[in-house]
Image: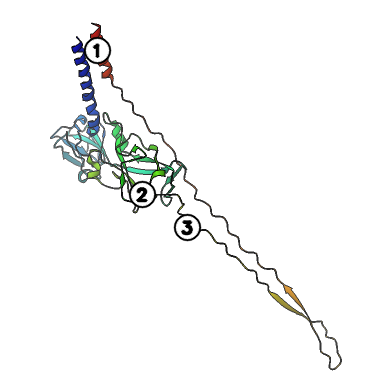
Amino acid sequence: MKDLSTICFIACIIAVFFLAMPVTAAINTVPPGGIAFIGEQGLDIRATGVTTGSTIAWFGNANVQTGAPTTTYLVDDAGNYYIAPSAFIGKTGPWFTFPGRKLAFYVEEPSLALQIYDETLDFQVVGTTRWVPKGDQIGFRIVSNLYQMTNRPGVAGAPVTIRIRSPDGAEYSSVSGNSLVDIPVGKSPYSTGPIWDTGSYPSGTYSVWAECNANGMNDNYNIPGRTITPVDPPGNLLIQSVNPLITSSLTPTTVVPVKTTQVVTVTTSPPAVLPAGTVAMTEQTPVVTSPPAPPTFPPAQPPVPVPATTVPAPGVLLLIGCIGAGLLCMTWRGSR
């Protein structure tokens, strides 16, 4: 009886692994009326009603029930289908079975954007505001429509990887003990929170970008803003202790006042009649003007940080009921 209980417990453990396997593989399964993104390959679209050898149709602005389709494609393998950019760019929206004219799935252009935030000072690192004081905490926000992959069975979010290239050319797969690979983005915007303590990292300019290669979409459709975010050389993040806007201290200019004397001649009128041989004298009064006041300079003002909004990261809870079933089985067998 004890051996039977052990076998029952082992069988439950094996069942757990079999049940867990489809969760990681289901990201390629498109449900009925689901969304497929341009660039994805190896998709299983059989659940949408599409079969191998059948036809799918895109009607554009035409009436689906009465109009003729604008484009039709023959599906060579419904279990391994490719949303090729050459075939589907400009043909986004609903696709239907044909001639059945029933909605099968939607095709969308992927979009992906990455925002860098100084979580310590609460501002976004963007444009010319690229300096983060060394020692501050950095977090990321991912804005993307790829979160809709959560509608696929067993998918917690679209796997997005953040890539960081250091000033010496090294690339990080994690920072401060936090992984940057295949982050499950289940909503938009998605916030990682403060995950990067810059205090122990080299000073200098970093390149930071994000990409999603779910079902090979970045390999097939490597377009900035679609499956990868753009980054301008030499980088988009500067980590150092000194504000780069402070180049040198201001040296005030000393203005030396100059005294000017203006001579004004005052002559009495009418002149007195003097005896012959006498010289007439005029009185001269010096007038001194005040020196001009030296100019003053307003103090330099620091840049005002742009406020940002922090969105908490979601949690994932996995309950394994089969293990509990195995334990109950052992208890039941043991009581007999």
C-alpha separation, residue under disc 2 versus residue under disc 3? 21 Å
Give the percent coordinates (x, y) of residue 208: 34, 46
Residue 314 visible? The answer is yes
* Label located before the other in sequence (1 or 2): 2
Residue 257: quarter of image:
bottom right
Q: Quick check: 3 above or below 133?
A: above
**Which type of secondary structure does the marked residue at label 3 adopt?**
loop
* Amino acid type indicated by mark 1: Met
Classify mark 1: residues with Cα within 10 Å, few (<14), some (14-19) or many (20+).
many
Residue wearing tag 3: 247
Residue wearing tag 1: 330
Give the percent coordinates (x, y) of residue 133: 45, 47
C-alpha separation, residue under disc 3 versus residue under disc 1? 74 Å
* Amino acid type indicated by mark 3: Thr
Classify mark 2: residues with Cα within 10 Å, few (<14), some (14-19) or many (20+).
many
Q: Quadrant of the C terminus?
A: top left
Residue wearing tag 2: 206
